[in-house]
Image (cartoon, rainbow, N blue to C red):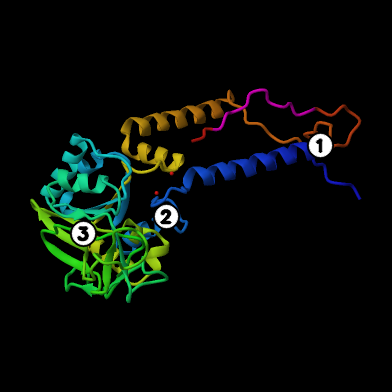
Amino acid sequence: MRRPDVDTPRALLVALVAVCAVSLLFAGTMSSAAFGAFNAGWDGSSTVRDTAKEAGATPTVALETTAYAEADPSETVAFVVAPDDEYTDAEAERLRTFVEEGGTLVVAEDYGTVGNDLLADIGAETRFDGRTVRDLRHHGPTTAMPEATNVSDAETTDGVESIMLNYGTVLTGANGTVLVRTSSYAYLDTDDDGEADEGEPFRSYPVVAAEEVGSGRVVAVSDPSLFINTMQKRADNPRLVSGLVGDRETVLLDYSHSESQPPIRVALIHLRDSSAAQVGLGLFGLLVVGLRQSGRLHLPTLSSGRGEPASPGDGGGDGEAESIAEPNTHRREGGNHE
């Protein structure tokens, strides 16, 4: 029985290239950044995108604050979760204008200063305390995962009986509606020793609050961890996210001041937002098709023989077989994180 003609080295090379391409594609479309919209791991926030879709909204990842100027404020809710860098005055002004014209902005922070600075810049009076809140009676695996059980009767909290934090903080100066409070067994661990000491009184603290700014509103959430995938499985955290989305058409996920996003995702976002890039890509595609049809662009093919060129005929006859020439022009594949 004749063995099939296989060019083993070339087949192995093709397989290796395919594996590398798949690996690069995966790395270029997924993210390991904490709170990342494209991070499906335990510390990512890909679940929030899914929740937005289930609510009938269109989730949009924003890498620049100019996205606020392009959004319809009355139909958009924006999320800023644990921002890493400060917003410039011009950037903060875009967010403030968005809110004043009827938009809803959700700011989630715990220990950083960026969240408080942003709240001040957009005209909100609520602030994040910065100290870890613990609860001795109502909590998850540890007292640093308090289950906030005092929930106000509001449209945003419809169906929410409790939410769970994960080393979160509390809110101060809430000038509006407190949506969720801890139980009365909560305290602020000022010295971070994990114990309720003298000078750390038990009381019910606000952890989610909303206030009006202009025609819109700002919602402060005192723990960004509430939005990560693993915490979206705790208590009624996913219902709170659904309530924040409401019936709005667009969910704007602001990653303009967060860790880097997957490069391929970033490229697709820029392509979506750039008419010039779309036109350029279209022209490039037409050029490739034109060259291909004219015969001036040759794509590489695999030889079907083992060291000998394949015959265009049936391999029989007395004449010398005509070989299939390997092309000497190779087309370079174009290449390139929530």
Q: Amino acid at mark 3?
A: Leu
Camera sees residue 7: no
Q: Residues within 10 Å of mark 2 (few under 14, many from 20)?
A: many
Q: Residue at x 68, y 25 (%)?
A: 327
Q: Which residue is mark 2?
A: 44
Q: Is residue 163 above or below residue 249?
A: below
Cβ–Cβ under 8 Å for marks 2 and 1? no
Task: Tell me the chief SS of the magenta region.
Answer: loop
The extreme front residue here reads 198
Q: Say which label, 2 or 1, has the lower sequence index.
A: 2
Asked which secondary structure carries label 2, the reply is: loop
Cβ–Cβ under 8 Å for marks 3 and 2? no
Any mark on residue 171, and which?
Answer: 3
Q: Say which label, 3 or 2, has the lower sequence index.
A: 2
Q: Amino acid at mark 2?
A: Gly
What's the magenta region? 323-333
Q: Is residue 272 above or below residue 30?
A: above
Residue 171: x and y in percent read 21, 59
Asked which secondary structure carries label 3, the reply is: strand
Give the spatial CA distance, label 2 vs label 1: 49 Å
Q: Residue at x 82, y 39 (%)?
A: 314
Is residue 5 shown in magenta? no
The picture quadrant where one finds residue 96 is top left
Residue 334: x and y in percent read 52, 32
